[in-house]
């Protein structure tokens, strides 16, 4: 069989897997994440609990998912993604069905702890790890972009769908329908389309003639992808700090933006519509980031976008009372709302390569997920103490700090000791 035929077959398998993961992550985020907000009202009323108590269950899921990031990433590096992601699909469907049956707070929190485990097994991080392990370097960025672009539609599909199901059938029956949908769609796709065996990451072009010219690739030294070596790299800690701060800032805005816009004088319906610009523009931001990576390193592109975010959100208290001003600020801020989905795997690959990617991504994903979970709570405390204007300005500062840290990582080269480790592998 000719090499051309073999390469074509591999490309076909990769396209099939990317298409499958695009569908499964969209359904996964739609059911495991976005359905919660659509069901929050009827669920709290039926269970006779406060909104804060119910939101605590969702926070529990995020924290559990964060804690599972490293062991799941390690498992992906050692054994591949098929078994783990297929098992995660079953676990997710069972957990959502269990959610439909809860009768008290203890059961609700227990179910959401299981949902957190399932999220760590089926959403973007494991999907990216699988793609990185089996795709040639030149195809990784576009493959990840495809998954995130389709996944960005999850809220647009599942928020109205869940709301309709809850209105027509009640929130418990809506969850049973969603659990069945999750199982029927995601389990067979994970079982049939995901690469079956232990990954063998490829950091060289398929013709074996050297490193692929991956878009935005770091031209300097690259650390070997050992978790121990990564933890000894000062650049990793700067990178982690940037994404932790930025993740917390985005979480604060996603939760508090509508209330802040209302405080600026916008009616609730208009405030909700303006906040919806963030989701719409996040897809555009991902496209801009990916296209720009042909000319600039991903860390530089991301730093520039985060700088634009900092300026845009800082101007919101000044011009946000007017519709045009609010739209302008939120359009610019929204460009960076989904950028980390594309930027994080690209930057990690740029600096560390594909070996051990799942574990390394989990090491970064744990603190960033915790920041996402706890950021809105800290933001609420700041808003209660000082008002929303200082909170919004603190988000601007956080974006600026994250941008500076990302720019700094380009200047932090591996130490001589780490270089010697890399060359002796």
Image (cartoon, rainbow, N blue to C red):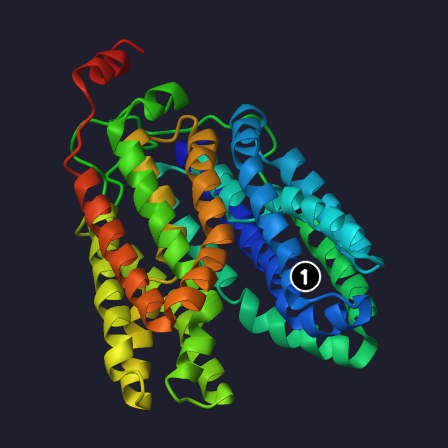
Query: Given the current orientation, which residue lies at the most extreme front position?
Result: 385
Left or right of residue 166: residue 85 = left
Left or right of residue 382: residue 208 = left
Left or right of residue 302: residue 26 = right
Which image quadrant for residue 218? top left
Q: Is residue 278 above or below residue 381?
A: below
Q: Position of residue 10 (x, y in %)?
A: 48, 39
Q: Position of residue 89 (x, y in %)?
A: 69, 46
Question: Which residue is at the front of the view, 106 or 187?
Answer: 106
Q: Is residue 138 visible?
A: no
Q: Is residue 127 above or below residue 180?
A: above
Question: Which residue is pictured at 34% across the width and 39% down the height?
Answer: 240
Question: Which residue is pictured at 45% across the width and 56% down the height?
Answer: 378
Callout 1: 10 Å neighbours few (<14), some, many (20+)?
Answer: some
**Circle 1: element type:** helix
Quadrant for the C terminus, please: top left
In this rendering, the count of numbered labels is 1
Q: Is residue 20 above or below residue 256?
A: above
Question: Which residue is pictured at 25% across the width and 83% down the height?
Answer: 319
Q: Is residue 47 visible?
A: yes
Q: Position of residue 366 (x, y in %)?
A: 48, 39
Question: Which residue is pictured at 61% across the width and 47% down the height?
Answer: 119
Q: Is residue 66 above or below residue 377?
A: above
Which image quadrant for residue 182? bottom right
Residue that badge 1 annotates: 54
Left or right of residue 204: residue 71 = right
């Amino acid at each position: 069989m000719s090499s051309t035929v073999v390469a074509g077959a591999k490309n076909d398998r990769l396209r099939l897997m990317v298409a499958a993961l695009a569908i499964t992550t969209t359904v996964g985020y739609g059911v495991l994440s976005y359905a919660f907000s659509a069901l929050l009202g009827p669920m709290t009323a039926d269970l006779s609990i406060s909104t804060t108590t119910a939101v605590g269950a969702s926070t529990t899921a995020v924290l559990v998912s964060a804690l599972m990031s490293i062991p799941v990433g390690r498992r992906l590096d050692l054994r591949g993604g098929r078994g783990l992601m297929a098992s995660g699909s079953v676990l997710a469907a069972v957990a959502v069905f269990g959610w439909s049956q809860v009768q008290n707070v203890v059961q609700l929190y227990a179910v959401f702890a299981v949902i957190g485990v399932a999220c760590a097994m089926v959403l973007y991080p494991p999907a990216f790890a699988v793609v990185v392990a089996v795709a040639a370097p030149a195809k990784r960025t576009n493959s990840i972009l495809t998954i995130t672009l389709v996944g960005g539609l999850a809220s647009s599909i599942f928020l109205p769908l869940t709301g309709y199901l809850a209105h027509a059938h009640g929130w418990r029956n809506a969850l049973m329908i969603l659990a069945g949908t999750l199982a029927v769609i995601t389990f067979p796709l994970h079982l049939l389309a995901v690469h079956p065996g232990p990954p063998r990451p490829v950091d060289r072009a398929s013709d074996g003639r050297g490193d692929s010219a991956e878009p935005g690739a770091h031209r300097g030294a690259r650390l070997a992808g050992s978790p121990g070596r990564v933890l000894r790299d000062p650049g990793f800690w700067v990178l982690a700090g940037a994404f932790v701060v930025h993740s917390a800032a985005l979480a604060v805005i996603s939760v508090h933006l509508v209330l802040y816009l209302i405080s600026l004088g916008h009616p609730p319906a208009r405030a909700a519509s303006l906040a919806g610009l963030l989701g719409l523009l996040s897809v555009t931001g991902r496209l801009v980031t990916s296209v720009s990576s042909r000319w600039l390193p991903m860390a530089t592109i991301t730093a520039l976008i985060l700088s634009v975010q900092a300026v845009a959100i800082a101007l919101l208290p000044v011009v946000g009372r007017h519709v045009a001003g609010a739209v302008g600020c939120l359009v610019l801020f929204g460009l960076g709302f989904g950028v980390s989905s594309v930027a994080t795997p690209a930057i990690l690959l740029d600096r560390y390569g594909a070996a051990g990617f799942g574990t390394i991504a989990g090491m970064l994903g744990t603190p960033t997920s915790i920041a996402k979970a706890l950021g809105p709570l800290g933001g609420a405390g700041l808003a209660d103490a000082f008002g929303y204007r200082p909170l919004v300005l603190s988000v601007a500062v956080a974006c600026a700090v994250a941008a500076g840290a990302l720019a700094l990582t380009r200047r932090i080269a591996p130490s001589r000791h780490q270089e010697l480790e890399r060359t002796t592998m």
